[in-house]
Image: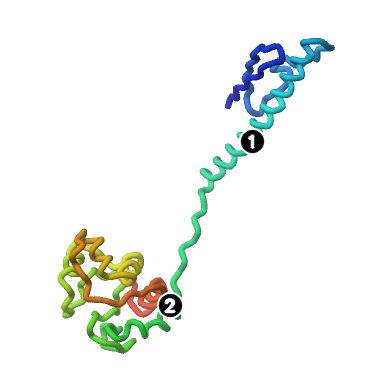
Amino acid sequence: MTLRAHQTTGTGAHIGFRVKIGTISNTRLGLDQRPTGGLYKTEYTQLSDALCQARKIAAMIKTVSLSALAALAFGVMAPPAVAGDAAAGEGNWRSCRSCHAITDNAGTVIQRGGRTGPNLFGLPGRAVASFAGFNYSAPLVEYGATGAVWTEELFAEYVTDPTSFLRTHLDNTSVRSPMSFRMRSGAEDMWAYLESVSPAAE
């Protein structure tokens, strides 16, 4: 990398020079012979000051360049995603049980609950609005027809505000979800709990 610098002397003369980062020297700038006095000594001092400043700038650029190369070589570490706490999710099941139950495929009841909402066993990785025998709302069926599958991100978005979720994904501000409950916090914990009691998603 080449750094260009300019210095105006006390006589009004405009001095320009180029230096290559890491190879700045007095010799390359013609300053290997120090003048003894008079006008040339003044210009020598001014040019020397400019050289010192150029060296400082070059050092800073070199440091920044090395940092950028290190970031490219090793990658910038992103903060790890916060994992849900299955135990905390189980503790919060009380907010879901008025509408939902968790019953495995053999009929074993994992969590008792209401039938207003579908069975949540096997929800992680399941196609939206696909639990057999449950009468889903028309907007959710429409969204399920897009091929959407429940992921942690979709689940968290949905339970935070079901109506807003459907309006966003269906691009229709008139639809409403029959699910009025909103989970203000802990969606990642509930997802972790549902994963812990469900078979691994294929």
Quadrant that contains the N terminus: top right
Residue 157 in view? yes
Q: Kindly state the secondary structure of the residue where label 2 is placed.
A: helix
Q: Nearer the viewer, mark 2 or mark 1?
A: 1
Q: Is residue 70 above or below residue 27?
A: below
Provide residue 147's location: percent of width, then percent of height: 21, 63
Three-letter code, disc 1: Met
Instruction: Specify few, some or many for label 1: CA neighbours under 10 Å numbering under 14, 14-19, or 20 or more.
Output: few
Q: Which of the 4 image quarters holds residue 170? A: bottom left
Number of disc labels: 2
Q: Kindly state the secondary structure of the residue where label 1 is placed.
A: helix
Q: Is residue 168 above or below residue 91?
A: above
Left/right of residue 73 with respect to residue 186 in the rendered view: right
Quadrant that contains the C terminus: bottom left
Provide residue 72's location: percent of width, then percent of height: 51, 43
Three-letter code, disc 2: Ala
Provide residue 92's location: percent of width, then percent of height: 40, 82
Instruction: Specify few, some or many for label 2: CA neighbours under 10 Å numbering under 14, 14-19, or 20 or more.
Output: some
Q: Is residue 93 above or below residue 21?
A: below
Left/right of residue 180 with respect to residue 185 in the rendered view: left
Residue at the disc numbered 2: 86
Left/right of residue 90 with respect to residue 177 in the rendered view: right
Q: Which of the 4 image quarters holds residue 132? A: bottom left
Provide residue 20's location: percent of width, then percent of height: 62, 24
Determine the residue located farthest toward the right in the rendered image.
Answer: 36
Query: In this orientation, which residue lies closer to the viewer: 150 or 116?
Result: 116
Q: What is the distance, in whole Å, between disc 2 and disc 1 at their CAs?
A: 49 Å
Residue at the disc numbered 1: 60
